[in-house]
Structure formats: structure tokens, C-alpha cells
């Protein structure tokens, strides 16, 4: 885990955290998306963020994308139904986190285009627990 951020309400500045508490079926305690149906946690790849910064020609801090969790170690799964263990929490991909017009403000001109296919995923929380800086993230294969 390379970065954790929450925003207490929509359009509020992102606040860096050393840990977040996730509640199954509800989301991140203290975050603007708390209690939504499926948008519990957004996860992005530090490597994809670096690619976006290179495309923009300037540094992009993880908070500028407004994602909750930034992980190292490669791509974030984007296929619905894929599960990701992040720290103590089991998450399930709902959809791709598409960049929106807010990225033009938070990242500057060209931000949304730079994040296209690099924005990470929106996931629902299947279990409760803590996610801490330094925790590992790993795709979980179903056992049938």
C-alpha cells in the first residue's frame, strides 16, 4: 500500500491517512461514499499513476485522482467479480473507475485523458477490517 485517502464529503479535499477502517456492505468509515450500494472503495495502481504523470508531463500525487487506495505491484484488476484482498479486507470489483471532469480540476488540464484506462477500479467491501499503509494487495482466486 503506497497511499490511503478519504474525503469526508463530496468535493472536499482528500485527506491522507495511515489506515482506514472498512465495513462490509457500507464502505470506508468517514468517507464521502459511506453507505452507497456498491461504491465502497476505489483502488488505483501506483504504476498506472506514474504512467498518467508521464503522459501529462508533470507529477500527479495520488490524492489528485480522488481514489481511496493506491497500491504498488502492478495493475489493479478491472473485471467485475474479481476479488482483491487488501490488508484485512476482501473487496470485489464492481466496475472500472472511469476518470471524470473533476480530474481536470484536481490534476489540471488533460488529467481525465491521462487517466483513461489507468484509473483503477471501484470495489465493494465483502468483509470488514483495517487497511494500513504498507499492507499487501493480492488478487484472490475463487476456490470451487
Image (cartoon, helix red, strand yellow):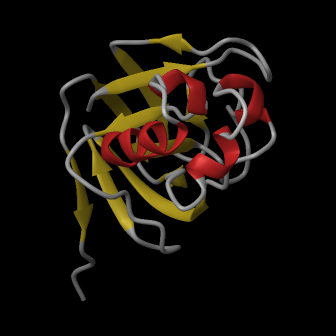
Q: Is residue 3 above or below residue 51?
A: above
Q: Position of residue 133 (x, y in %)?
A: 26, 22
Q: Quadrant of the C terminus?
A: bottom left
The answer to which of 45 and 1 lies nearer the viewer is 45
Q: Quadrant of the N terminus?
A: top left
Farthest residue, direction front: 57
The answer to which of 12 and 55 lies nearer the viewer is 55
- Relative to residue 143, is residue 34 drawn left or right? right
Residue located at (69% from left, 45% from top)? 112
Q: Is residue 82 above or below residue 56?
A: below
- Relative to residue 95, is residue 84 drawn left or right? left
Q: Where is residue 16 in the image (x, y as percent from the top left)?
A: 46, 12
Q: Where is residue 26 in the image (x, y as percent from the top left)?
A: 61, 40
Q: Position of residue 4 (x, y in %)?
A: 41, 23
The answer to which of 77 and 40 lies nearer the viewer is 77
Residue located at (38% from left, 35% from top)? 70
- Relative to residue 134, is residue 112 drawn left or right? right
The answer to which of 48 and 37 lies nearer the viewer is 48
The answer to which quarter of the image holds residue 141 is bottom left
Residue located at (33% from left, 39% from top)? 46
- Relative to residue 16, is residue 74 drawn left or right? left
Farthest residue, direction bottom: 144
Q: In this view, does 23 lie above or below 118?
A: above
Residue located at (28% from left, 52% from top)? 85
Count of marks, rendered view: 0
Amino acid at each position: 500500500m503506497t497511499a490511503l485517502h478519504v474525503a469526508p464529503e463530496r468535493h472536499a479535499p482528500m485527506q491522507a491517512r495511515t489506515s482506514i477502517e472498512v465495513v462490509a456492505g457500507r464502505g470506508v468509515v468517514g468517507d464521502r461514499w459511506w453507505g452507497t450500494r456498491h461504491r465502497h472503495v476505489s483502488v488505483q495502481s501506483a504504476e498506472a499513476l506514474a504512467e498518467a504523470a508521464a503522459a501529462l508531463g508533470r507529477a500527479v500525487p495520488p490524492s489528485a485522482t480522488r481514489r481511496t487506495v493506491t497500491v504498488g505491484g502492478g495493475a489493479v484488476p478491472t473485471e467485475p467479480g474479481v476479488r482483491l484482498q487488501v490488508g484485512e479486507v476482501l473487496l470485489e470489483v464492481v466496475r472500472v473507475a472511469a476518470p471524470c471532469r473533476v480530474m481536470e480540476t484536481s490534476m489540471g488540464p488533460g488529467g481525465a485523458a491521462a487517466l483513461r484506462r489507468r484509473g483503477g477500479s471501484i470495489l465493494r467491501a465483502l468483509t470488514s477490517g483495517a487497511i494500513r499503509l504498507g499492507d499487501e494487495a493480492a488478487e484472490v482466486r475463487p476456490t470451487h
